[in-house]
Image (cartoon, rainbow, N blue to C red):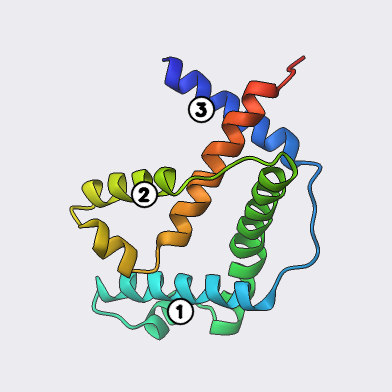
Amino acid sequence: EENLKNRALQQYCFVKIAEGFKTEDYPEKEIETYYDSIVDYYTQYAKNYNLTFNDFLTANSVTEEQFKNQMVVYQIKPSMQNEMYLYYILDKEKLDISKEKIDALIKEAATAQNKTVADIKKSEQVYVFEVMAVKDIVLEYVVANAVIK
């Protein structure tokens, strides 16, 4: 119950502070990196049904251009904005992110996915765990310093 309360408070603080954070400048290279990972995900998803990525697009009545535009607007840019917001707070408040925190998250994921830490690190998912660690650190800081009325 305490864990649930803490997560709800973190989410509430995150949303409230993020409301005031806006960006219009999204690095095109990062957008492409995100998009490539989404295509990889949906390609694997389609394979589960003996389909190709193009078959998946056809089944959903979208062209790749439409799909990409939807992903950029509704998934990629919002995710990037949240990450930029988290890193902004991390830098502004001079919070420290430790390699140990990232390694602990990778180890936890490896156990949950029945993989080795080396497998996770080879899969280029390390950045995801860094972002998770930054989010944890920033949200702990925000909740500890929040004044909720």
Q: Is residue 16 above or below residue 120?
A: above
At 65% from the left and 56% from the top, the residue drawn is 78
Q: Which mark is residue 109?
A: none
Q: How far apart, in angstroms, are the residues tagged by discs 3 and 2?
A: 22 Å
Q: Secondary structure at mark 1?
A: helix
Residue 19 vs residue 98, the one in the foreground? 98
Q: How far apart, in angstroms, are the residues tagged by discs 1 and 2?
A: 37 Å
At 49% from the left and 47% from the top, the residue drawn is 132
Q: Secondary structure at mark 2?
A: helix
Which of pointers 3 and 2 lies earlier in the amino acid sequence?
A: 3
Which amino acid, mark 1? Leu
Q: Position of residue 40 (x, y in %)?
A: 40, 75
Q: Quadrant of residue 55?
A: bottom left
- Would residue 98 appear left or right of 44 to someone viewing this image? right
Which amino acid, mark 3? Arg
Circles 1, 2 touching at the beta carbon (< 8 Å):
no
Which of pointers 1 and 2 lies earlier in the amino acid sequence?
A: 1
Q: Which mark is residue 7?
A: 3
Residue 126 vs residue 12, the one in the foreground? 126
User: Would you name the residue on which mark 2 appears?
Assistant: 103
Which amino acid, mark 2? Asp
Circles 3, 1 touching at the beta carbon (< 8 Å):
no
Of labels 3 and 1, the one closer to you: 3
Q: Is residue 94 above or below residue 22?
A: above
User: Would you name the residue on which mark 1 appears?
Assistant: 57
- Would residue 67 appear left or right of 27 to someone viewing this image? left
User: Pointer 3: residues within 10 angstroms few (<14), some, or many (20+)?
Assistant: some
At 58% from the left and 68% from the top, the residue drawn is 71
Quadrant containing the N terminus is top left
Q: Secondary structure at mark 3?
A: helix
